[in-house]
Amino acid sequence: MPPLYPIPPPPTPPPPFEFHLKPTRQPMLWAATAYSVGIITGTYFWRPPALWIAGGVAFLLAGLYFLRRRHSLAIILVLGALFLTGALHMQLRGSTSLPDTTLQPFADGQQVEMTAHVTREGRFRNGGPNEIRQTLDVQTEEIVTEDGAKTPTLSGVRLGIYSTNQPATELSREAPTLSTRLFHYGERIRLSVKLKLPRNFHNPGAFDYEGYLAGNGIAALGSAKAQDVESLPGFSGTRLELWRTRIHSSIVAKVHALWPAPQAALLDAMLIGEEAFIDRDTRVDFQRSGTYHILVVSGMNVTILALVVFWTLRRIRLSDISATLLTILFCIVYAFLTGLGAPVWRATLMCAIYLGTRLLYRDRGMLNALGTAALGLLVFDPRQLFTASFQMTFLCVLIVAAIGLPLVDRTSRLYRQALAHWDADDYGPSLPPRVAQFRADLRLIAERLARFLGGPWSLRLVRGIAIVCLSIFELLLVSAVMQIGLALPMACYFHRATTIGLPANVAVVPLTQLLMPAAVLAVALSYVSPLLAKLPALLTAFALQAITGTVHTLGGLRLADLRVATPSLVVIATASAALVLAMIFVRRRLLLAVTGLVALLAASLALAFLPPHPRTRAGLLEVTCIDVGEGDSILVVMPQGRTLLIDAGGPIWGGGSQLDFGEDVVAPYLWTRGISRLDAVAISHGHSDHIGGMAAVLKDFRPKELWIGLLPPSRPLENLIADAHALGVNVVRHWEGDQFDLGGAKVDVLFPPQDWPVGLEPKNNDSMVLHVSYGATSVLLEGDAEKAIERRIAALHHPHSDLLKVGHHGSATSTTPEILAAVKPAFAVISVGFRTSFGLPKPAVLQRLQASGVRVYRTDLDGAVTFYLNGHTVTPALAALP
């Protein structure tokens, strides 16, 4: 008997995925590219605004005219209009922010009374010995000078409040005494403060600290004692920001309650962007292993959380549109709570646009979302184009979308089809031959295993193992493409070749995918019950332990510490061309795709292992006094190109600074000069403002020799020598009377003698004094030598020199009439900090130099100063700064 109702046939499997050689159209990506090129053009090639406007209107009208006649020409004309609009926008906006000069009359180091309110909550950091520093941002309301004059002001100040009281624990957020309590958003305070203007180190390659602070609304820096701070009644600020800071602080408190202090410090940074508790060594380990993006709230963190939220909402049967909208809302709330500004909002915008375009365009959503986000952000502020953060964010996504995903499409995604409709026997013949064979082989293996496991379980096991293997392959492939593609910006901005980034990210990224949702769940459940948060907290701790173990192990390898100098323009152009070719060829025929990838790999290897030619002048003796503030660091380049660095700057008294002068000041200057290795480094004496940065210099530049003279008892000196031995650097003791040739120049050691008594601690008169000569020209480098040593050198050696490096930063303890009479310099250079509390250089020293007819240069006023000695004359030159 036939059935009353016809039985519907089984559903037909969807057609298998096919890789298309022809790339899909990405109109928004091209639009963003045209606008970006226009911004660059407008920055470096000024034209009257009317010219840009006229050209843009003409291109746009022409594009509209040809829209229905010649479509391709119309698109080119519209892109030209976007190019001209970008150039016009950049010229109207200006390439830099105008500095806030309101506080300039008060920023002279004199004590003033300031009334202000807190705009960024305080954070405790270690200051100098037995000192705690709280840093916070405030907005001024009124300034009262010593003569009682009151001036209403509205400017940002980054404030450091110092106290000798110790907080209860190293990572506590609240100190136990009122004098060191943490100040919160919106509080009004009155305090006696010394203000100063922020100042960059005036060296090529130096970080633009002034611009960074200006971008954060900070016009001046201030320092005050905790006992001079008075709380005032009232609140000043917005309620929305107050709620944000309170929620932010509450989340940080929950993190510290759920996990031990070391783990909580890392989770603070990963989850909510609170980096106050991360020490420098931890940062360096993550940077060396190529996993620093894990440590900070970045686009990857936002993406992981968005994917987990979207997946969860779809699992509970919400529609695609509802899940998309709720996920976007979650990303917005998360970005708001972190309070990290442009980078997180940029990632949130990209995620929101991608999720939106995914509903409309599906297969082409990623690159169109990238172009839309980039165009929107550049229209808002075109200056973002020149920031490393903006470039790295978009380049990462572009590499994944334009190279990584097409490679996945033409490799593993094809074979994933073999795992679809796993129980259907008639699906295999519709697959490409090689994929069908792969499916048949897997099913054959499953049939063999069915004897032991049974049919259903063997099929599931084989399919599961195949999915895991393909997933690992895709992770390796995309990670490798990312590491290779990012070699150029990593070399230019961070001077690192992440040689172990691939294995580190392969291990760390999956762990982060477990850590992020587990940590968020643990924090959320802790508001309900600490007991409910136990399990996700344990999962988080497991993942974090595995991440830190991987980072410390791989980051500790010597291979991981590969530092590179700034590439030449030719290498930058070649590497950029290789990246573009790889993006274009990856969707072409196999030979072209392989050619593009090989070219990209060759460019990344060249960036890592082929050092650029140092930017020096052959046949000249070069002496450069690097601007390191109140310290010394002198680069000497010999006529045959050999290099010697004397001292590496450092903080006064050896503490209270978050800056590593070797890594953050001296090294960027050397890398900008194309110097990736040093022949020798020398320590004049053991004071912190001379040796504080030397440990980083040893690691970054691996010199052949470390020159030292007297060695008084000193833990920093002992540690430095131990570091040198560990790195294989030959430690050489030099004494008075040593003479030797170095790269075509003659070096004479004038002090100390081998029998000179050694004190109980480092002193200025321990300084190694060097006389370097080339032909009839020479320089005297005396460190911090004081009067007694100067008189001894003048009497015994009569060191006539064309150039004098003034002793002890222009202090009255040095630059005696005797040394000036013996040296008879034509030029002198003083390494000194800008408006320091020591009042250096002393007027008496400057008067003596002027009376002797010496032309004086100073790093506080002139920045890095270079002198070229050609054997006959000396030519000074100032660094060309932007």
Image (cartoon, rainbow, N blue to C red):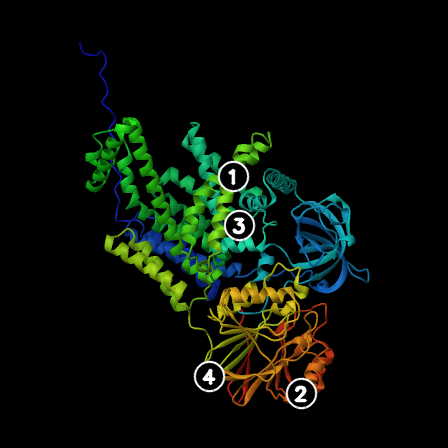
Contact (Cβ within 8 Å) of mark 3 with mark 4: no
Per the model, the C-alpha gap separating discs 3 and 2 is: 58 Å
Mark 3 or mark 4: name the one nearer the start of the chain. 3
Q: Is residue 38 visible?
A: no
Circle 1 or circle 3, nearest the eye: 1
Q: Residues within 10 Å of mark 4 (few under 14, many from 20)?
A: some
Residue 234 sits in quarter? top right
- Cα separation between marks 1 and 3: 28 Å
Query: Which residue of the protein is positioned furthest toward the front in this rendering?
Result: 755
At a point 76% along the width and 46% down the height, the residue shown is 177
Q: Which residue is mark 1?
A: 540
Residue at numbered disc 2: 794
Q: Amino acid at mark 1?
A: Thr
Q: Is residue 766 left or right of residue 536?
A: right
Question: What kind of residue is marked 4?
Answer: Gly
Mark 3 and mark 2 lie on one chain; the one further toward the N terminus is 3
The residue most toward the top is 1
**Comparing labels 3 and 4, the label whose residue is closer to the camera:** 4
Please, what secondary structure does the residue beneath circle 4 have? loop
Where residue 45 appears, x then y in whole percent? 45, 66
Q: Which mark is residue 619?
A: 4
**On screen, residue 426 above or below 717:** above
Q: Percent x, y for residue 93?
A: 53, 58
Marks 1 and 2, the one that precedes in the sequence: 1
